[in-house]
Structures are given as structure tokens and as C-alpha cells.
Image (tube, helix red, strand yellow):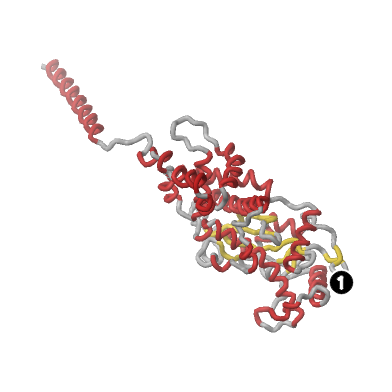
Amino acid sequence: MNRNYEYEKALWRRKVIIICAMRLQLAKRNSKKRWYVRPIFQERRNLGHHTLLVEEYKLNNSAKFYNFMRMSSSNFEDLLSMVGPLVYRIPTRPDVLSPGEILSATIRYLASGDSMSSIMYAFRIGESTVSIIVRECCLAIWKVLKIKVLFTPSTHGWIQIANEFHNNWNMPNCVGAMDGKHVVHQAFANTGSVYYNYKGAHSIVLLAVCDADYNYLLVDIGAPGRNSDGGVFRQSTLGKKIIYNDIKFPNPTPIDTAVGPIPYYIVADEAFMLLPNVMRPYPGRAKGNLPVDKAIFNYRLSRARRCIENTFGIMAAKWRIFRRPIIAGEKTVVAIVQATVVLHNYIKKYEKNQGIFMYCPPPQNDHNITRTFEINGALEPIGPVGSNHYGIDAKEVREKLKFHLMNEGNVEFQYDKI
């Protein structure tokens, strides 16, 4: 009896196992089939934007290519020859991304300001893959270009920059214009209020010095936005180099017969501290009660300082990633800013060598173009970043420069601007 019971029990157990296995097999057969590569991505080589637009425009429409990539096809190929080896992927599968596809998707993301989802559909690349290649490619661009187009000038280089400021903007011994911007982004994970600035947004800080032709000379990228209330300049690597005179500007030289030698200096607005090598306006201009000589000094300084505002404006106009808050991780946002800074310099330099000026046409050199991008964009002005206290040396340099601008260094139109 017991033996029959055990036999029946074992038999039923086997039947249950068989039935469960059959039901599982049937469920798998009826379930939605999953692909190794989704059909939309399988057609990338035929229907993706890299093939349909980038390669097509490269061959048949140079103007469209420039509009799409923000650079000429020869410029793109030159950049690809430098970046390609750093983003190359070993072909372990048929659909592996080529360096050209990686670079074109990244450049289009920066140029268009579209979301990574839009780039996914346009280039037929997985969204997580887009995020990875944008960060990797931006880092590669920064690595290969910073040594070519973003380095501290030599003594002779600083003197050349000073000559350009004097010729173009009538400011003697000026070697740069400095300002900073908040680069607004979506809140980073697990960072709390570290990047929360006084304007109620999350941001990193971009501090920059440019020359008279809208090229970046020195940059400091990545300081948390909350530090913008007085300490960002002093705490930044760029600020420390300027404060402690580690940049090694040329020795002071005379600007006229009456004033004598003054140091080479950078022009900045009232947000920055006054130093012997950093000139800022006299306070009180908003009230309209400044003496004529101080008002003229402020006008002449702000006229030269316009260079950095225009540099930011040109970059934001070309790279529309800055038209809205950036949605990306912390390292990716920093890499995006780094890449766009060196791309700005690289394209300008490349076009200058080719004798063309499409990236920054001459009409843009005649006025301030910043107001078109700051409203609701990812670049916002920073608040005060330096102390209002200054030393006797800095005050003396400013007084000498003011005297020069009112006498031997005056220009006819300055009295009409105050």
C-alpha cells in the first residue's frame, strides 16, 4: 500500500514538472521577441544622420555641412584625424561605432542643443551609448586641442596681445579681458546644494580670459556654483595665478612720456578685485555722479572688456548646448564646457589660416552680441567674485591709466559716450 502511494506521488511530481516545463516553453514561444540589436539601430549605417546628412553634405553641399557641423568638411576631417585614435573601438561586433560616427554625433549634440534622446533617434544610437560617447569624445577633444589652441602665451606672445588690444580697443598694456559665467545644468545626483547658486539654479562656473580677437587665453572650469558669492576667483587656479603673479606677464613698460611704466594688466568688471594686474571700473557709475575723468576711464575699460562678453556670446551662438540648462552628469557637463572652449579657438584658428571667417564674421566684431543668449540659457552672469578692498599699488596703476586716457591716450569719441 505504502509502496503504491509513493509510486503515485512520484508519478504526479513528474507530471507537474513536465507540465510546468511545457507551459514555460509555450510562454517563451508566445512572448514578444527580443533582439540582439533593435531594428531602428540595425539601419544606422543606411539611415542614420551620419550617412544621410554628414557624409552626403560632405560630398555635395559644403554650406549645409558647415551649418550642420559648425565647421567645414576639411576642418572636420582634420579634427577627426586627431580625435579618432582616442575614440576608436575594437570591432568586436558588426555594428560597432566608427570614430567618424562618434565625432559627428558629439559635434551635432553640442551644435544643436538637442537632447540625447533626439541624438539617439537621429543617429540611431542607443541613448545610454550617446551619453557615453559624448563624454568620451568631449574629453578627447579637450585632450588633443588644449595643447594646440589653449596655452599660456610666452613673453613675446603677451606683448603681441597687448599690441592688438592697443590697436583695436585703444587700451595700452592690456593683455586680456576677464569674466565668468554660470553654466546652468540639471541637479547632479547625490550632490545636495553644492552646485546650487544664488540665482536658484544648479551650475558650475566658467572663468575665462580672452584676447582682443575673441580667443580664449586662460580658463578655469568646474567650480561649484554656490562659491560664486565672493570666493570663486581667489579659490580658483586661474585666480591664484593672477593674484600671485604666477602667469609672468612682461615687465612694466611706459605708456606715455608723462605717466611712465605701468604693469601689463587684464580688464574686468566690478565683480572682480582691483589688483596691479587686474583693472576694474571706478565704483558709482550706476548712480551717474562720477567725475568726467572717472566716467571716461570706466567707458574705455568696459569697451575693451566687451571682448570677453562677445567671446561668450559667439560661443553660445554657435554651440547651442548653452541655450538651455544642460542635462548630463557632472563629469559630462565639465567635459562639454572644456570641449566647446577649445573648439571655439580651434575653428577660429583653422579658418584664419585658411583665410575664411565663417565662424566669426567681421560684422560680429563691431558690437556686443551677448544679450541674445543669456536670457533663459545655460550661461548666466556671475555675482561678485572678489573683494572691494585693494592696495596702494593697484590704486596707483589705475590712476596712471586714467591720466593717460584723459591726455595722450584720449580718443575723439570718448566724450560722447558718457
- Nearer to the camera, 308 or 263: 308
- Give residue 163's position: percent from left, percent from top: 78, 62
Rendering coords of residue 405 (x, y %): 79, 74
Quarter that holds the N terminus: top left
Q: Identify whether 353 is placed above or below 309.
A: above
Quarter of the rendering occupied by the C terminus: bottom right
277 or 197: nearer the viewer: 277
Taking the image as shown, residue 350 lies to the left or right of residue 123, namely right
Compared to 401, does 120 lie above or below? above
Question: Residue 204 falls in which quadrant of the image?
Answer: bottom right
The residue that label 1 is drawn on is 259
Residue at horizontal 59 percent and vertical 41 percent from the top: 83
Q: Is residue 322 left or right of residue 48?
A: right
Residue nearer the viewer, 325 or 339: 339
Residue 335 at x, y = what percent? 57, 49
Q: Give the secondary structure at mark 1.
A: loop
Q: Report the residue at 17% width, 24% height from top.
A: 15
Q: Give the left or right position of residue 409, taking residue 53 as reference.
A: right
Question: Residue at 50% of width from left, 37% of height from top?
Answer: 98
Can see residue 350?
Answer: yes
Residue 13 placement: quadrant:
top left
Q: Give the residue type at disc 1.
A: Val
| Total number of numbered discs in the rendering | 1
